[in-house]
Image (cartoon, coloured by chain):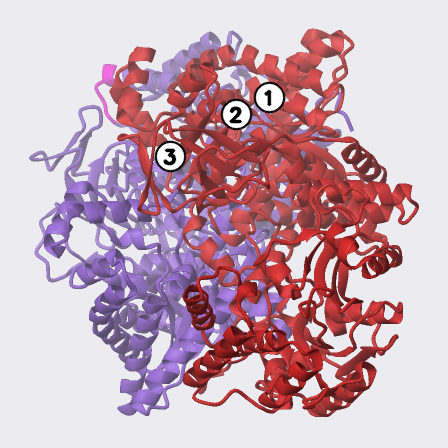
Chain colours: A red, B purple
């Protein structure tokens, strides 16, 4: 077993790439109404290639071309960047077909065919990979083009563009060099638009570009068009592993092993004169979803001009005016395509000397609002069924509709980026302490609370602020969790800001100073931190939203509950359509200004009698909270977790604060300092918390159970239905559960007897430690329900503190060591294994064991799908995530039916 | 599922108690050479009952009696303290048999039978449960006894003893009340010995005792002997759940559900005159194991006088002198019994008017040295085979032999001498109560517990102390027996010391005063009591030890390695017979005074270049450590773990220390404070440590791999064999392992190429997180070995920080919530499940995957057995635990063969 040589070069690799089994067909032709490929062959031909084949088959006018498969791409990488055997021969054959179809010849001095070489992966990765246009121009063919078009300006313009693209993309020359030469030329000629350059200018520029090319590559610009083609194909393949592409795939969860296809297609030109043009469009409005052709065009321009935004395109009406025939043909074709694809499409077209060509059609990206409207409309139009409609909407996208957002039309100055912890947008004046935030809010001022990191004492200020910005902490830090729970815009872990709390200013990126009182805008959906007041648009849950939610509820099998700690949260949950509350964190009630004093008294007590005295003060307050929540929930189940965090979390941390508290409590400060020290822990996450507190200080849990049951009994006597589910946290051993269950039942029965009320209740546990999963078959016979606490389960399964992970986890994600932050999206392989184990062991002994999840993952669509798959009864998430979870749950049910979730809405 | 009533009363209960299936036989008779029971029926009859039955069958003279079964005891507890149906009738029947056998009658006014009522559980629990002697004395029978024995003094002595025992044990009267009356009487009569009281005194005393009884119980002393018997049986059963008994069982791992049997046996008296006596003995020396009858006796005394240490017993030679016939009969019987049981026995006997009765025989407790000698000798004597010999020794007991002894070269001041009751040496501060001892131990203070004599209430304190010193009692007194059982240094019967417990000092020989808190040293091997702290040296491992270890090595399948961080540790490991090193914690080298500065420089560096500069200083030091270790280990494998703890552990923590360091490093203190703050973690255990450091700062791991491989290459070139196994800690994801493995292999191969040396090495990982266990099938194909880091695996599986558990874990153990501290003995159910999972998944893909354990559990016999069972290749433990682990590994192998481990050596 001893090692003698390195075993591998690249330690982090995906699964095996897709391979052709026996086929050695690498090239698929399309043109003249015939295509070798099909619209369904996206895996092999990529989205663009499959679309071109499909359009060709539909007799839509498409410039002839061919697609080199993703298999060829993958083999190219396996082959140390060499073409697979036979590929090039197939390319040559296909080229003959293209020449025939177009009536032109590649490299011909008289009637030269030019082609585009474009990447096209299974999933659209806009702008991420490379494209070379006008390929085939050589000194020989250039003359032919001039003659044929009788347009020297056009020919040289095409040539200089080709040199730029080929030089930068294929040969890796800094594109700036070409840009500078162009700028110099324009400046010499005292013009600003490229279009104002005349033929002579462009000819001169082409010469300069050739020189730049020669200087950079130490070789002449290739004069053999097939040589050009070969290099361009290699470059397109190579761009699959370009930095931008890799990053995009990581962000969008696209596997590395798909590979890209390469499309070689005859060039058509929208810039050969005033009867030419180019454009892009959507079959419906991608922003609102309205059913009208939404397109823009440029006359006498190439497609890249539209995409690159170099010239501002005109409304499609312009085309109608200048080229009515092409326009009406386009209108017919776009309708035909939408009917064919049964979805809103994004199309590209070019008119060359009055003749319309379709260059691309694919499912169009759209805003959440548009996605809803299109889905609902298409069901009305009987194009699709309800299930398809549901699958057309990305649950995460709904987030846009649930929070105020920055007006997309506004131009804003993004100063820096943090983690997008809680979505929506917020505008306000910067403040640095919770106290100031609360005061400002009392004066109706809108503020952004900026903290290094937040702690439970900041709750009041967080509530008061419009948004929260922290310099430290991850997606599950205090600020993030609380922010999401409140539905409050929150950006965390923004390392670029340097806070000078005492001096009341912060510095961004070491150069921008923002003082207290200055305005900031936060975008919690993207993590952007923006200077000044950006204009916001209000959220709207319109009728389409409601219809989709109704369909989702009809479809889903999973319950969706909310994590809500107060009557107010409960009310919000009901608005968002919760099926109950999956997690009431009773400790959040403890921080309330009106009761923290009694809580601290309880903690600092030395005897059980003293503790019970302090607890007696808290009991009526807790009881009222529970009554409030039960009333709001109108008889839906409410899972209440007994006290979970270590007691020291409730104490002040600085000596000054302790002194204040001591004076307040009329005890010597030394006692408080000593007690505080005694309570400190090395690893509080693994410390004296959860049911361990219940065992050490049973009087605390007794008080809480009493408060819950008194609330339940009082309501029951008033004939108001309520269903408390009492949850014991942090169970690691069956005996802990037995003792806590016995305590709960004993106190509950005492209360019921005292009230003579038949209040119902159940007792269960949070499954949040690996050992609890392992001994699930011991717990299930006694417990009425489990709720998976996947935050802590993730921390313990990984041995990873979410409070500390910020130091290395971002790098792990960045480098692809972990595919996703396991605190955001459930680690199905590890944590999921434990959940499945617990569920299976539990259900084996108690078939009807109720199972839920109340970690942050309850609002993550992929996690929701996993929960559905392993048979949970419900997920619970922060109130503002409920619609997302409802739709995700519907997707999960449909996926189990075998429906594929549409990627196009991502 | 809603609850309506309490489900259970007692949430923490053991497994179901042993139940008779259909049998309703609760009573087993023995007497006149016949017995209903057998020596093997310990479960049912307890050790004592089974022994009495067996002895009776062997025709050894045993006073007739009967045993009430453990089943009856368990049913008694289940029945709310009522006898099971039919039991009492069986008692009455058996009593008839006893009367017949002894020719006497229970309650008879002329020839009254008296009986003893004693507990007797499956496992011996010396002094832990209650005994009532002389039962059957009533005003009626008393006259008969006087007439029959013609010894009024004896009769009243027996009566007053009976009232004391019955009153205190059965009726719960404070024993002190009787003691005070006795003391008063002696003081009035100006005598010191009980034996100096005459018949009239004792008659008067009996009257006083009756009055005490009446006053305390408000009822007359029972005059019906059967009423006495019934109450006494109930008291014996009840003592099973007495506090002392529960505590003893917890300390010794004896389950609560075994129950105790109750033995009713005819009384014989050793105190009827000078031709009577009583004694206890061992068939071999329980301290050294020497093959000679080792016994003590008291003439004209009852057995309790010996056991309680009230009178200091005489050598057995005394018996030979006074009662030669009884003596020679005893010699024959003890030999016969030892041959029969094939083990060293602990026997009790009484001579009543010249006639010998055997009262008890059981396997005798012994010191580790004796256990070894007896085991080795008995193999030589062909009494037992080697495997039996191995099973006779409790691995944990070897600890005694591995404890330090007083350096013979040191000159020490021996103040006085007591009896050498339990060998070894102990140094500590004097304390006078068990309570203080326990508190001191909780603070990690070493103490010597000094008592006049110990009683079962002192168990906790004896456990906590380094050593025990008593003023009274012999080699078989409570302190001596318990001390040997615990393997704890113990000196007893040291008459030279005069203890003033309340005033907290003792006087030795009337002139040396030793106060609480002063240091004493005990030599349990010689009985020396020494002033101050004597220097201790390592023990010599004698020939018996070596023979047993050799046999263990022949038997065991598991390798035993050590956790050793330095060449010195490595040398000790070799002495103790390690098969290699299972864990070198490289960070321990970092703390060395000579290098901590460079380490801190490295940590405080802001750039990789700075870090590499500091690391370059550490490299040669680490290399030399590794060379030292490799040389000591003589080609045995050495597993080296790369840096594991979070970096802040290496930094000073107070501002003053930081200032000093800053001055030393010539950097502004602010920089160090800032960096220190930056490195602080909320939960360091779950923080930036292990391979996470290797990924963030690859240069650290590169340096360490370089140091290991340079050491290996240099030795290889000198033809010195070494086998480094490089271990990556804290893997939670396969990509972490892939990256770290690639780094290790790359650097290792670079070093080998540079040295042109064919040094071998392997790369593996520590499996210490639940997620690593779950994804084991991904890691195993790449890793050469796993070493289970069960400390961290326990922390994460339980969600329990070792550093913080002190606040509630002791209570968990105390209350039986957890059966054992999971950091001391492996939690086989939870953590073991994960280990088994990882082992099975790993071996499924790599059959020869090397598996070990390097957590603290590697030296715990129960954990070692588990490791054997799940197929590990080796365990690794601290050097001093190696012999324990070697023997435990042999036991594990024998147990798998179906051999039962003997409990008698516990």
Q: Secondary structure at mark 2?
A: helix
How many angstroms separate mark 2 from mark 1 (CA)? 9 Å
Secondary structure found at label 1:
loop
Judging from the image, mark 2 belongs to the subunit labelled A
Chain ID, mark 1? A
| Frontmost residue, B440 versus A267 | A267
- Residue hosting label 1: A566
Q: Is residue A554 visible?
A: yes
Report whether mark 2 lies on the same chain as mark 1.
yes
Query: Is residue A300 part of the magenta span, yes or no?
Result: no
Reading the image, the residue beneath label 3 is B273
**Is mark 2 in CB contact (under 8 Å) with mark 1?**
yes
Which quadrant would residue B376 be assigned to in this image?
bottom left
Q: Position of residue A713 (x, y in %)?
A: 70, 12
Mark earlier in primary sequence (2, 1): 1
Q: Which residues are magenta?
A: B187-192
Residue at mark 2: A588
Q: CA distance from mark 3 to mark 1?
A: 85 Å
Between B785 and B358, which is closer to the camera in this rendering?
Answer: B785
Across and down, in percent, residue B477 comes to: 34, 41
Same-chain status of marks 3 and 1: no
Q: Quadrant of residue B311?
A: top left
Q: Residues within 10 Å of mark 2 (few under 14, many from 20)?
A: some
Q: Position of residue A546 (x, y in %)?
A: 79, 32
Q: Is residue A776 above or below residue A749?
A: below
Task: Name which residue lies at 60% across and 87% down.
Answer: A138
Q: Are marks 3 and 1 in contact (CB under 8 Å)?
A: no
- Mark 3 lies on a secondary structure that is loop
Mark 1 crowd level (few <14, some 14–19, many ≥20, 10 Å Cα): some
Using the numbered discs, state the Cα–Cα distance from disc 3 to disc 2 in whole angstroms: 79 Å
């Amino acid at each position: 077993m001893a090692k003698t040589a390195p075993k591998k070069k690249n330690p982090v690799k995906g699964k095996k790439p897709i391979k052709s089994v026996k086929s050695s067909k690498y090239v698929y032709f399309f043109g003249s109404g015939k295509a070798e490929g099909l619209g369904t062959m996206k895996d092999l031909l990529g989205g663009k290639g499959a679309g071109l084949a499909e359009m060709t088959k539909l007799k839509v006018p498409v410039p002839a071309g061919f697609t080199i498969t993703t298999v060829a791409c993958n083999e190219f990488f396996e082959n140390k960047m060499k073409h697979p055997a036979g590929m090039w021969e197939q390319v040559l054959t296909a080229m003959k077909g293209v020449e025939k179809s177009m009536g032109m010849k590649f490299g011909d001095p008289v009637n030269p065919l030019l082609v585009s070489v474009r990447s096209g992966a299974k999933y659209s990765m806009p702008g991420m990979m490379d494209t070379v246009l006008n390929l085939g121009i050589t000194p020989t063919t250039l003359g032919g083009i001039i003659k044929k078009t009788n347009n020297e300006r056009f020919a040289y313009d095409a040539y200089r563009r080709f040199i730029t693209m080929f030089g930068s993309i294929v040969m890796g020359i800094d594109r700036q060099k070409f840009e500078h030469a162009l700028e110099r030329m324009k400046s010499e000629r005292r013009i600003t638009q490229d279009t104002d350059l005349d033929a002579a200018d462009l000819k001169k520029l082409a010469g300069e570009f050739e020189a730049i090319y020669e200087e950079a590559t130490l070789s002449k610009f290739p004069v053999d068009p097939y040589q050009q083609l070969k290099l361009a194909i290699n470059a397109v393949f190579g761009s699959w592993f370009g930095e931008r592409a890799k990053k995009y795939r990581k962000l969008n969860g696209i596997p590395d092993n798909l590979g890209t296809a390469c499309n070689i297609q005859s060039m058509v030109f929208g810039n050969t004169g005033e009867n030419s043009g180019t454009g892009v469009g959507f079959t419906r409005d991608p922003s609102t979803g309205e059913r009208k052709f939404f397109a823009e065009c440029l006359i006498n321009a190439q497609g890249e001009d539209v995409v690159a935004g170099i010239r501002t395109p005109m409304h499609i009406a312009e085309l109608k005016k200048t080229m009515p025939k092409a326009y009406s043909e386009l209108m017919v074709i776009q309708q035909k395509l939408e009917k064919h694809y049964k979805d809103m499409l994004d199309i590209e077209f070019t008119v060359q000397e009055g003749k319309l060509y379709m260059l691309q059609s694919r499912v169009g990206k759209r805003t959440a609002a548009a996605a809803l409207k299109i889905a609902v409309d298409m069901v009305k139009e009987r194009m699709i069924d309800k299930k398809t409609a549901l699958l057309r909407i990305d649950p995460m996208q709904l987030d846009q509709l649930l929070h105020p957002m920055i007006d997309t039309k506004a131009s804003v100055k993004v100063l820096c980026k943090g983690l997008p912890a809680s979505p929506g947008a917020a505008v306000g004046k910067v403040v640095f302490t919770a106290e100031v935030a609360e005061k400002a809010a009392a004066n109706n001022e809108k503020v952004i609370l900026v903290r290094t990191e937040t702690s439970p004492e900041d709750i009041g200020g967080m509530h008061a602020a419009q948004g929260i910005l922290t310099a430290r902490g991850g997606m599950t830090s205090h600020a993030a969790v609380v922010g999401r729970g409140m539905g409050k815009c929150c950006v965390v872990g923004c390392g670029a800001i340097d806070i000078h709390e005492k001096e009341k200013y912060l510095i961004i990126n070491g150069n921008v100073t923002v003082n207290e009182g200055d305005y900031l805008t936060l975008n919690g959906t993207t993590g952007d931190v923006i200077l000044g007041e950006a204009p916001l648009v209000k959220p709207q849950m319109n009728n389409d939203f409601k219809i989709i939610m109704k369909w989702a509820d009809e479809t889903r099998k999973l319950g969706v509950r909310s994590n809500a700690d107060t009557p107010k949260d409960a009310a919000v949950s009901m608005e968002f359509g919760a099926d109950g509350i999956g997690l009431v964190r009773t400790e959040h009630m403890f921080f309330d200004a009106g009761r923290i004093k009694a809580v601290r008294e309880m903690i600092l007590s030395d005897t059980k009698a003293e503790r019970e005295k302090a607890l007696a003060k808290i009991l009526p307050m807790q009881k009222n909270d529970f009554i409030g929540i039960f009333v709001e929930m109108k008889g839906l189940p409410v899972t209440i977790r007994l006290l979970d965090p270590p007691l020291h979390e409730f104490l002040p941390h600085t000596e000054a604060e302790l002194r204040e508290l001591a004076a307040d409590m009329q005890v010597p400060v030394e006692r408080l300092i000593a007690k505080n020290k005694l309570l400190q822990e090395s690893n509080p996450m693994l410390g004296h918390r959860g049911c361990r507190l219940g065992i050490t200080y049973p009087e605390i849990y007794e008080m809480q159970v009493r408060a819950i049951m008194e609330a339940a009994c009082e309501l029951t006597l008033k004939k108001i239905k309520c269903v408390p589910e009492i949850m014991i946290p942090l169970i690691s051993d069956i005996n802990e559960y037995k003792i806590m269950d016995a305590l709960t039942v004993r106190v509950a029965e005492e209360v019921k007897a005292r009230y003579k009320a038949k209040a119902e209740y159940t007792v269960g546990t949070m499954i949040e430690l690996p050992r609890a999963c392992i001994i699930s078959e011991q717990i299930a016979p006694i417990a009425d329900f489990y709720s998976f606490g996947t935050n802590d389960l993730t921390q313990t399964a990984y041995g990873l503190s979410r409070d500390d992970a910020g130091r290395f986890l971002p790098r792990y994600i960045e480098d692809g060591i972990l595919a996703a932050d396991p605190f955001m999206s459930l680690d199905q392989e590890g944590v999921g294994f434990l959940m499945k184990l617990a569920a299976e062991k539990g259900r084996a002994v108690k078939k009807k064991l109720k199972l839920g999840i109340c970690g942050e993952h309850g609002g993550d669509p992929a996690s929701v799908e996993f929960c559905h798959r392993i048979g949970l009864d419900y997920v619970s998430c922060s109130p503002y995530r409920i619609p997302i979870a409802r739709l995700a749950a519907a997707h999960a049910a449909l996926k189990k039916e075998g429906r594929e979730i549409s990627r196009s809405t991502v």
